[in-house]
Image (tube, helix red, strand yellow):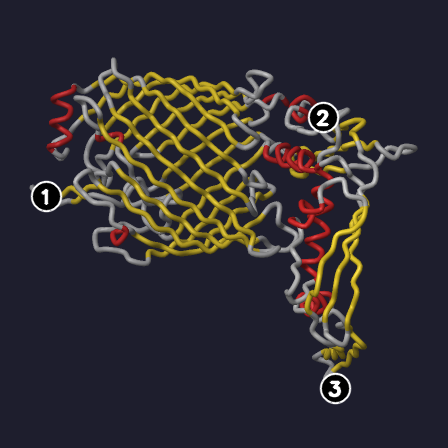
Amino acid sequence: LEKLKSFYMNQGYLEFAVESTQVSISPDKQDVYITVNIAEGDRYQVSSVKVAGDFTLSEDELKKLLKIKTGEVFSREKLNESTKAISDRLGKEGYAFANVNAAPEIDKEKNKVAFTIFVDPGKRVYVRRVNVTGNTKTRDEVIRREIRQMEGGWYDADKVTASKQRVDKLGFFSEVAVETPAVSGTSDQLDVNVNVTEKPTGNLMLGLGTSSTDKVILSGSIAQNNFMGSGNNVAIQVNSAKTYRTYVFSYTNPYFTQDGVSQGFDIYHRTFNTTSTTLAYYSSSSTGGAIRFGFPIGEKESIGVGLGLDSTSIKTYTQTPQYYKDYVTKFGETNLSVPLTLSWASDGKDSFFFPTKGTFQRASLEVALPGGDLTYYRASYQLQHFVPLNSKFTLMLNGEYGMANGYGASGLPFFKNYYAGGVTSVRGYKASSLGPIYTDPSTTTQYRLGGNRRVIGNAELLWSLPGMDKSFRMGWFVDGGQVYGSDEKVEFANLRYSTGLSAAWISPIGPLKFSIGRPLNKKDTDKTEVFQFQMGTTF
């Protein structure tokens, strides 16, 4: 009934009322009938909107916050948004207990209504103390360094909201609650109480997949995002399959300095063997490491800088494309490179695990510096946007573009090509199956080469089940993407598309991910994979 009333009130029916309701049961007692008697009343138009009271801000600034306008059909939703906007703006200036109320003046003859919005800011309030509770494992300082509202400073509603979001984005807590109670016996003080509920931050991930070549693909990682309650991240990743093996150790200190400069390093060893796949025949072995730093340039933005050292060895075979063989003959089987990485990221999402609104952007550049055996660059950009359609549904839009090339004698190494297809790009197609194809002239077998440009686009309608908004989310997705060779034009007509359903569940035994994808414009040379899943456990 409240939704019915809201619908009418938002359409201008200021005097709408529910006069009575009757409930009856069918003779066979199988159905229940509810009869609602309503009085719509007349539809009203807004004749004027005034602001009155004790102004701490200019009247012009307050009027700019009004969502309800003169000449429009009355809407209770817009009226409530107007009073809330003024209250929030006063809260930003320290007036935590402001009263903002709208008084209507109804002209029934003309079906018009005038509103006077009375503003009483009250006293300006400062924060006496910031209290942190519930952190049984995480150190107090790890939470406090994310809080932007300072003790002894004027209360700022925006800073309190930002503090809650930053603590939530740590990913260490299942619940983050912030309250701002007034201090007893005072009229100009309040406390900010931050209460958190710890959750397991260690992650033991096991992945299982199948393909026509690898049969079974096993992957695993062990990570502690909150190592000994310090907020530091330690991770070991192991992937093992018939075609590849990966071993990575990573460490990150997000607060290497008190100003929020992060420091981390990675050590890795990777092997890749395509001789039993549809990728062009070759095998590689890479060993290296990198050190990286992150510099915050705002509440939501950061810049990253990293420098690494990589040694890659390549082995060719009879079926290896001649271009690959020529590259190895010219530059040798083992190449040393010194990659410099630069990145910029902006994270405006409202949640770490299941965002409902906000935008994420990331631009990155990897350049193999002169002095090594390889000289190339790889540049990429990602834009991800979450749009709340209503309280239940969220639209996620994601776009990615990557390009790479050589700038010296070595050109772009073929093992630095982009690939697409699979659970992280275009679901419904097998991993790395999209893009240019090489046909072996002796066997007519086709192999995937990858390319120097990649385009990915994803649109996904996300929703949570009632009572499970923190642990379970489903989605209907449409993916599109393609990889292009250096001699090809980027044409969207060549994109491959797919659609399907996805599910993500943070279950008692760990995070589970599922997707069922169906290609929409599959070509004869495309390789498809309908079902994919990932499972793990937390500790």
Judging by the rendered image, the residue that carries numbered circle 2 is 150
- Answer above or below: position of 443 versus 261: below
- 10 Å crowding of disc 2: few (<14), some (14-19), many (20+): some
- Closer mark to the observer between disc 2 and disc 1: 2
Q: Nearer the viewer, residue 62 or 193?
A: 62
Q: Quadrant of the N terminus?
A: bottom right
Instruction: Give the amino acid type for the residue marked by disc 3 in the picture.
Output: Pro
- Quarter of the image where one finds residue 19: bottom right
Q: Quadrant of residue 350?
A: top right
Label 2 is placed on what type of residue?
Answer: Met
In the foreground, 107 or 329: 107
Q: CA distance from mark 2 to mark 1?
A: 71 Å
Residue located 68% across and 59% down the image: 77
Q: Residue at x 66, y 62 (%)?
A: 70
Q: Secondary structure at mark 2?
A: loop
Which of pointers 3 and 1 lies earlier in the amino acid sequence? 3
For residue 443, the mark is: 1
Dot 2 or dot 3, earlier in sequence? 3
Ranked by sequence position, the earlier of labels 2 and 1 is: 2
